[in-house]
Image (tube, rainbow, N blue to C red):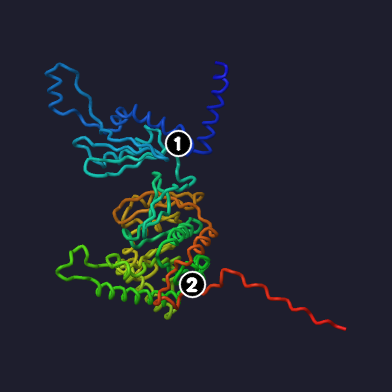
Amino acid sequence: MSWTAALLPLVVAVVALLRWRRPAWYWLTFGVTLAALRVLVRYASVMDACGLTVPPSRWRLALARIATRPVPESRPPRILRLRPTRTGLVLRLKLQPGQDAFDVAASCDRLRHSFRMYGVTSRELRSGIVEVRMTGYDVLRRVQMPANVDHEPMRVPVALREDGSVHYRDYREIPHALTLGATKSGKSVYQRNLVTELAPQDVALVGIDCKQGVELYPLARRFSALADNPDTAAELLDALVSHMEGVYQLIRAEQRITADVPDAEIAADIWDLPEDLRPTPIVVLVDEVAELALFASKDEEKRRDRVITALARLAQLGRAAGVYLEVCGQRFGSELGKGITMLRAQLTGRTAHRVNDETSANMAFGDIAPDAVLAAIQIPTDKPGLAVTGDSSGGWTRIRTPHTTLRQAVNACNRHAHRTPDLPALAAFRPALPSLTKDPAPAIEPAPATA
């Protein structure tokens, strides 16, 4: 008993320190077991308090009356599976007749308090089946990506979601995206992490960085084309439009629409072409879109109209040709001139880091997910990289990108520089770079002897 009494305060102190300094370790050792027991023990009473139960059916009431038994209690959703994860618990529920998935979603905040979890989210898997994901600690405070993540063509992991799952950027599902954020909000780190994950893939990277290339030129060894000023950007975008038209001609020549070809094999985009004929997909990264839309003279206005028209054409027609847009900026509103709102409407994916005003958040989510606007303007200044992401379906979630230094991104691009495709249509915009190896020092000739 004396040893137990002496060790108990030490164990409690270690557990408390572990929970404070290493919440992930605490969760995997103690938290997951305690949380699972808490959910199972409190489940029926919590569901009843949250209004997620249904009264007994008439035949059960009649059977209880005939058998002179007590009136049966209200029934909560049935637990199909309780699965622990490295960040929380996943609860799969079978809804009772008369219940709706919206009822569970509306009660997520009450479930979070009742089960003493850090966060609770829900989504409908299919009719009558709802998945409730619970997180046991703040997974976005210190982002640690899982060791095993899926790497598929044109689908890369870029951030961690607030429910502990990995957030992927899937270009084949969401071809074009808009990323907004104020200065020092983590927007550049998000873009840097995106380039780092795309570098090992068979994809051509095209960059437009009107800040004289300070963001993208350090990564230039992995880029097939780069523009560091609006004039070069206009010519580069025109070349991309010409390349896109050439790809469409290739698709038409290889459509295989004869009567003996099944419908599923008819080519409508580059992914339906044979692998030996498939053009290399292109990801176009625009670092600051406002620099392309601002003008101060008639000549600059003509260039601006030319740039926005080319971007709008790539956004409307580029998906089937394998041209994908990643547009970044601090603001993306109608004050940038005509054609901007049409371009924004084509950018399906939306990500907003910390913004300076509510209007900037409305530019990202006002037309697709109004609830996300409030979440975007509440991002604190001391959490760079924290963002709100959503798409045209109306769903949204909080994410945070792992901190990727510029040196890490440069090393990744240099390591995969041999994968940089040489596109003839963009050869004029290929960045000229010095060799990775240093030139040998010139030999020092001996000075002639003097008398």
Q: In this figure, which residue is indicated by the disc labeled 1?
A: 28
Distance between the Cα atoms at labels 2 and 1?
A: 48 Å
Q: Observer-nearest residue: 205 or 396?
A: 205
Q: Where, by quadrant of the figure, is residue 353 drawn?
A: bottom left
Q: In this figure, which residue is indicated by the disc labeled 2?
A: 228
Q: Amino acid at mark 2?
A: Asp
Q: Secondary structure at mark 1?
A: helix
Q: Can you give x and y, in whole percent of width and height, for residue 57 in the image? A: 16, 29
Task: State which quarter of the image contains the C terminus.
Answer: bottom right
* Residue 362 can be seen in this image: no
Query: 10 Å neighbourhood of mark 1: few (<14), some, or many (≥20)?
Result: some
Q: Can you give x and y, in whole percent of width and height, for residue 448 in the image? A: 80, 82
Q: Residue at x 19, y 21 (%)?
A: 71
Q: Amino acid at mark 1?
A: Leu
Q: Nearer the viewer, mark 2 or mark 1?
A: 1
Q: Residue at x 19, y 37 (%)?
A: 98
Query: 10 Å neighbourhood of mark 2: few (<14), some, or many (≥20)?
Result: some
Q: Residue at x 42, y 34 (%)?
A: 32
428 in relation to 34, above or below: below
Q: Observer-nearest residue: 231 or 326?
A: 326
- Mark 2 and mark 1 residues within 8 Å of each other at the beta carbon: no
**Number of numbered callouts drawn:** 2
Q: Residue furthest right?
A: 451
Q: Is residue 202 left or right of residue 102?
A: right
Q: Can you give x and y, in whole percent of width and height, for residue 222 in the image? A: 47, 66
Q: Secondary structure at mark 2?
A: loop
Q: Is residue 4 left or right of residue 362?
A: right
Q: Residue at x 12, y 23 (%)?
A: 62
Q: Can you give x and y, in whole percent of width and height, for residue 272 in the image? A: 27, 65
* Residue 341 can be seen in this image: yes
